[in-house]
Amino acid sequence: MSQAAVFKQLHADPQILVLPNAWDAASAALMEDAGAKAVATSSAAVAWAHGYADGGLLPVPTLLAAIGEIARVLKVPLTADIEGGYSD
């Protein structure tokens, strides 16, 4: 089953889906090890972890690299908060 299908099923289950918010690969791995069925990113936390204020100031390449690093260490689904989408 794909990660997207797993994530969709987690939303359909009667049990509440808790999405802990990671800011880097290490925090995401810890959340998965603690039993998270899926992990999210927090735009503010990812920005702050890279020395930027929240609100679209984190450069897109840095954001995408961070999300890639997080996704690489997880076996559970990941959903990413990408600020306002970096678009008008």
Image: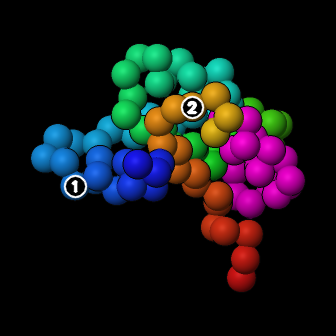
The disc labelled 1 sits on which kind of residue?
Answer: Ala
Q: Nearer the viewer, residue 66 or 55?
A: 66
Residue found farthest to the left: 14
Nearer to the camera, 1 or 39: 1
Residue drawn at 46 percent across, 17 percent down:
33
Name the spot of residue 48 as percent of width and height, x first: 73, 38
Residue depicted at x 64% and y 58%: 82
Numbered badge on residue 74: 2
Residue that numbered label 1 is attached to: 12
Position of 84 relative to 17 (above/below):
below
Image quarter hosting the C terminus: bottom right
Task: Point out the stretch of residues depicted in magenta.
Answer: 53-70
Left or right? Give the position of 69 relative to 29.
right
Helix, strand or loop under label 2: loop
Give the x, y percent position of residue 56.
Answer: 74, 60
Instruction: Check disc 2 and give the amino acid type.
Output: Leu
Locate residue 69: give its quadrant: top right
Position of residue 43 relative to residue 76, above or below, is: below
Question: In the image, 76: left or right of 64?
Answer: left
Q: Main secondary structure of the magenta part?
A: helix
Residue positioned 58% across, 51% down in the render: 80
